[in-house]
Structures are given as structure tokens and as C-alpha cells.
Image (tube, rainbow, N blue to C red):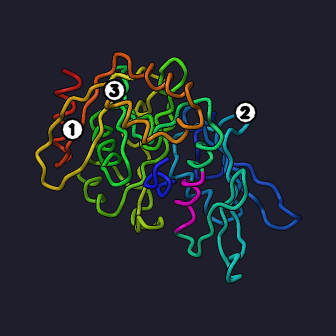
Amino acid sequence: MTAALTSQLDSAAIQANRSEPYARHECSGAKAVDQIRLRLGVINAEIECSIDGLADEYAELYGGYDAHGGDAMVSVRVGRGRSRYTMGRRFVVSGSEGRMFSVRRIEEVLPHVEWALNWEVVRRMDDFLQLHAGVMERDGVGVVFPAAPGSGKTTLCAGLLSRGWRFLSDEFALIDGEGMIHPYPKALCIKEGSFEVMEHLGLPMVQPRRYRKGKKGRVAYVNPRVAGDDSLGRKCRLGHVVFPKFEQGATPRLRSLTRGETGFELAQLSFNLRKKGNEGMTMLMGALQGADCHRLESGDIDRTCDLIEKSLLG
């Protein structure tokens, strides 16, 4: 896993009135605890929290998503605690291996819960080859946008989402042994510099300008379902791999890559390829069979999306 990736790692519809998928029980005979159950594509996620208001924020963030009715595949707990070093009061986010994050301000909690869920996917979903990438789908064909942080993949996914593409993920390309990509449609985390772009695209942000996420600073979130009832993608084959790199003012252009070049670069953007060894390399190269591979220099979001649609959809 590269240093950049390490630094980066965030059946009833959700309603704000605490109907499913929320359950509430008493913890230690005192504080009520919310259990939030979300079906995030192929992942059943569960959040247990004792922070007032967090469940309501998730009701907005994932409005229209389903609750899962089975066992949780990944789970996160969040509550109040103390700093290990200063003993000051903190909000503590924990996963399967204990404490993950400790933050001081309430506006930092939700982004770190989202971050913790991503890390739990890395830790626990080893059946899949995991690539750090955005994934969009059109007409049953998946397009993977692998990229290190800061490459513009989130904005690119949002631009295509606004044009009717289906959203699978802005976090992972989860690839199975048959080369198929599975959805993990987390809410899109938008950095402050892209707030105006979301407004331009007509994608309303949930609780805009409220949250803070580490070095990213102020962030907001977009629920991908705001683009329509059919905005979430399903399992699909890999048709294209596009490595995006945003350059302010650049003229958008695509350059073809060989599958060998693509495989080498994807290996640097995988969370578990080294752990999976030969099996992982076989999964990676198998998924690339039949895929067209490109490097994208992106600029203006409208012109970039025009180029993608013209070049990839023909």
C-alpha cells in the first residue's frame, strides 16, 4: 500500500424519524445507543453510536438506501471517551481492532466514521481484490477510475453521475474472482474547493460546509441517490480503466495504455494485492482482459465528461 493510500484511509428506506434501519437500546442502563444498519451495495455495514444527532445525520446522508437484514460484514462504534495522552474529552471511533480515531469536535465525527467504515472494508473483505478507485457504470459496462488522493476522481464521478451514469463507488473497485466489479456506493465526500462544482452539476450537498476531515479541511457530502432512483449501479464487467489527473485549465485528453502498464499501476493502488499474492495478480490480470485502458488529463468538468462519453461510449 502506498503512503498516499495509507494517508487517505474514510429493506426499508432510511427515514429521519428513526424507523428502520435504526434500532435503539439502553447501554449500561443509561445512555441510549443507536444501531444504524446500511446495505452499501455488496457490503452490510453497521454503526453503533451514542452521540446525539448522528443517526439523524445518517438518515439524511443515506436517505433512500436500504437496511440490511443479515449479519454485519463491517461495523464501527462511536461514543465519548478521553484522549490517551491529555485525558481531554474526545469522540472516539472504533473498529474491529479497537480505537481508530479520536477527534475533539462534533463536526469531525461523521467523516471519521465514514473513514473507519472504509478501513474495515480493507481489513475484512479480502475475498475481493481491492483497488483505490471510483467506479461508474453505463449500459452494464463498468469504468474504473483508479487514482491517488487529489487526482479529481470524486469530482469526475459526480460529473458523470449528473449525466445519468450509475454510481458504484468513490472508494473501491471491489473485483471478484470472475473479474466482475461489485458496488460499494458510499456517499461522495466533496472537498471545499469543489463545492461550487457540485452546485454547477445540480447535485445538492447534505449539510454543506459543516464537516471537517483531517488534512482535507472542510468537506461536504453528496448522496448519490439525489441523481435519481436508478442512480446506483449493480455488479458489472470491467470495460475501461481510466487513470485521471486533474490539471487546472488543462484541455482534457485521453492517452491509451497497454494492459501491462495498467496492471503495473493498478498494483500500486491496491490495498490487498500483496496479501493475496499470486491469486491477487491472477484476479487483476483476468479482470483486465478485454478492457480498454487510458490515462486522462482532466480540466473543466463539462468538457472532461464530454470527452469520456464520446471516447468510451462511442
First in sequence: mark 3 vs mark 1: 3
Which kind of residue does numbered mark 3 sit on?
Answer: Gly
Residue 262, percent across and down? 33, 31
Viewer-side label of 3, 1 = 3
Q: As displayed, is residue 102 above or below residue 75?
A: below
Instruction: Please report whichever mark, 2 or 1, sits nearer to the chain's N-terminal start.
Output: 2
Gap between marks 3 and 2 measured at Cα: 40 Å
Dividing the image into 4 quarters, which one contains the C terminus?
top left
Can residue 1 be spotted in the picture? yes
| Closer to the camera in the image, 171 or 243 | 243
Q: Residues within 10 Å of mark 3 (few under 14, many from 20)?
A: few
Query: Callout 1: 10 Å neighbours few (<14), some, many (20+)?
Result: some
Q: Residue at x 17, y 43 (%)?
A: 302
- How many numbered circles are shown? 3
Q: Are marks 3 and 2 in contact (CB under 8 Å)?
A: no
The Cα atoms of the two marked residues, 2 and 1, are separated by 38 Å
Tell me which label, 3 or 2, sits earlier in the chain: 2
Q: Residue at x 17, y 48 (%)?
A: 299
Q: Residues within 10 Å of mark 2 (few under 14, many from 20)?
A: few
Residue 162 lies left or right of residue 289; in this view the side is left
Quarter location, residue 98? bottom right
Residue 70's disc number: 2
Judged from the image, the secondary structure of the residue bearing numbered disc 1 is helix
Amino acid tagged 1: Cys
Between 249 and 165, the one nearer to me in the picture: 249
* Residue 21 seen by the camera: no
Q: Identity of the amino acid at label 2?
A: Gly
Whole-number angstrom distance, CA of label 3 to CA of label 1: 26 Å
- x then y, percent, for residue 86: 67, 83
The numbered mark at residue 305 is 1
Label drawn at residue 260:
3
